Amino acid sequence: MSRAADRRTFILATGGAVATVLASSLPGCSDVSPPRAEFRYGVASGDPLADRVILWTHARVPDSTSSVSLRWQVATDQDFANIVRQGLATASADTGFTVKVDADGLSQGVSYFYRFIDAGGAQSAVGQTRTLPRDDATSVKFAIFSCSLYSEGYFNAYDGAAKSDAQYALHLGDYIYEYGAEPTKYGNADAAKLGRVTAPATEIVSLEDYRTRYATYRADPALQAVHAKLPFIAIWDDHEFANNAWVNGAENHKASQGDWSARKANAARAWHEWLPTRTDASGNLLKIYRRFDFGRLLTLHMLDTRIEGRDQQYDGFGDADGGVARYVQAFSGGADASRRMMSAAQQTWLLDGIRASAAAWQVLGNQDIMARMWMPASVLQAQNAAFANPSAANQQAVSKAISDYLAAKATRFAAGAGALSPTQTALLNPQVNPRLPYNLDAWDGYPSQREAILQAVKAAGKRLVTVSGDSHNAWFANLTSLAGERIGWEFAGSSVTSPGFESVGLGTLAPVLDGSVSVAQLGSAAVGAGLGLVDDLLWADTTRRGWLALTVTASSVKADYLFVDTVKAQTYAASVGRSVTVQAAGTVAMS
């Protein structure tokens, strides 16, 4: 049988409509096959709605810049015997040979299979996807990721999640990193040894730079596997642009790299090309905040707290104290009230959506830590002195400041405030020993807007949960108002690969941050009691990489913090480091 006959047999087997379209693109009376495209970067789906989902692939004929005509198919079975939707699409140089289609006309709460086929019969991998659940759904399971630095190690977290029972994936940003490939750059120490040197070798600035970097990441088998298994709902953070970005600049953008607006536009365009996202109806590529209703269980509000409306960070002005005095002056004097992490338009959209939602839970998909990660000034001052001069005496001073503060908290917890010494009373008095944020790039650097959002949620009587990324460490914390009233809870997942506190010698800090160091003295009652350096922090892990598995029902939100034992080898083991369940009544259980 000739190659042309083989091809015709395949086409007829895929269905009459496919045969009609593909046959029209074949040369008449010729045995010459059209050139076949390669699908090097797999397939992906994302932004599911009740009746539709975005389908994605990259298709290119090797050594050609010609556009590639494709047919996409959606079926209820992996063999595509029951094709329910299909259509045409084109991968062209204008989009870096990526292609996205909005496959509509689907049924709510149903799982599907999808694929792409070119005119020569070349097929993509088969992907799985699903629409948003029906109103009567009893649970939803998410795999949640952030901070995946290719050069730091293998994407074992993606691999583990692809093999899990998750139904949807959330990516909270730092899907790529912008740094160059020099061994001295962040995260590159082991890149050559692991075979994970990123491309291009220079820091990415141009559109082609960003496209090449996405291609490097998307060639990873683990990332392809999780995209093929789960529909993604993604937002960006700073490294999709440049470190510590804000509206009009970034810490890692220099004048020599050209206009920030141009770089920002290049980054946003490449993100939309390579992620299975639904572009805003306005056509504005910089508007990515959007909402998803998962039956009656939860409304997911995906935010942009990075690019769309953020004012410059307090610590972005080069102050010797890292912006702390600037923060204190603005916060105490009222000037902070006008500063924004997101635009007024996005804040209005968010709060209107929360008020209108009838779901059991309101979930914010959020780039940065929202909880108040405030530490006592006595500890921060000692730590700053040790950073400036890491002498033995200064290191001992840090240890003493920490132990004194924690001892005061433990004493008050065990025996009441009357058992405190005058020194301990002063340590726990925020007027004497104020609490200060350690990261002004997070929501702590925008306290007034955070307070406005939390107060609006409280007034609406809604149950609030945030899922957050960026920090590279795992956290579970209360979301409290400035007066200390709990409004909601925050689950912050560890990074996929990006190094956390352990990379700067602070990996053992978690027990003093969350107070679990007091278990030896106070027993299991110390777990989740807020006895650490951070009042609102109930649990932390500052050493391991992984992902967050979140299960939502009408009565609870359960988070399993899953960790991989290595990112330096492709053979790994995954385990649950901590399970946390928040009940609708407000009680919390940890195991």
Image (spheres, rainbow, N blue to C red):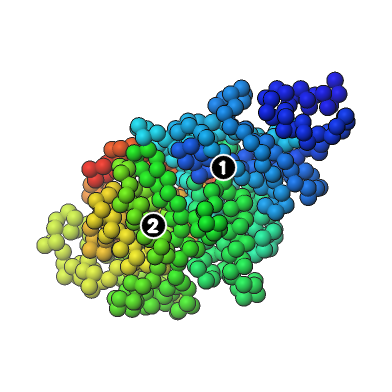
Q: Residue furthest top?
A: 1
Q: Is residue 555 left or right of residue 93?
A: left
Question: Mark 2 or 1 closer to N-term?
Answer: 1
Q: Secondary structure at mark 1?
A: strand
Dot 1: within a 10 Å radius of its alpha carbon, few (fewer than 14), some, or many (20 or more) residues? some
Q: Is residue 35 left or right of residue 370?
A: right
Image x and y of residue 218, in percent: 63, 47
Front residue of this view, candidates 371 and 259: 259
- Whether residue 363 is situated above or below residue 442 in the rendered picture: above
Q: Residue at x 34, y 77 (%)?
A: 335
Mark-to-mark CA distance, 2 and 1: 24 Å
Q: Is residue 527 left or right of residue 367?
A: left
Q: Secondary structure at mark 2?
A: helix
Q: Which residue is mark 1?
A: 102
Residue type at mark 2? Trp
Q: Residue at x 67, y 60 (%)?
A: 207
Question: Is residue 275 visible from the viewing direction of this image?
Answer: yes
Question: Is residue 471 visible from the viewing direction of this image?
Answer: no
Residue type at mark 1? Asp
Q: Which residue is mark 2?
A: 349
Q: Residue at x 28, y 58 (%)?
A: 456
- Whether residue 55 is situated above or below residue 541 in the rendered picture: above
Dot 2: within a 10 Å radius of its alpha carbon, few (fewer than 14), some, or many (20 or more) residues? some
Q: Is residue 558 left or right of residue 262?
A: left
Front residue of this view, candidates 339 and 562: 339
Q: Which mark is residue 314?
A: none
Image x and y of residue 310, in percent: 45, 67
Image x and y of residue 45, in percent: 56, 41
- Whether residue 21 is situated above or below residue 307 in the rendered picture: above
Q: Residue furthest left?
A: 418
**Do the CB atoms of the residues marked 2 and 1 lie less than 8 Å apart?**
no
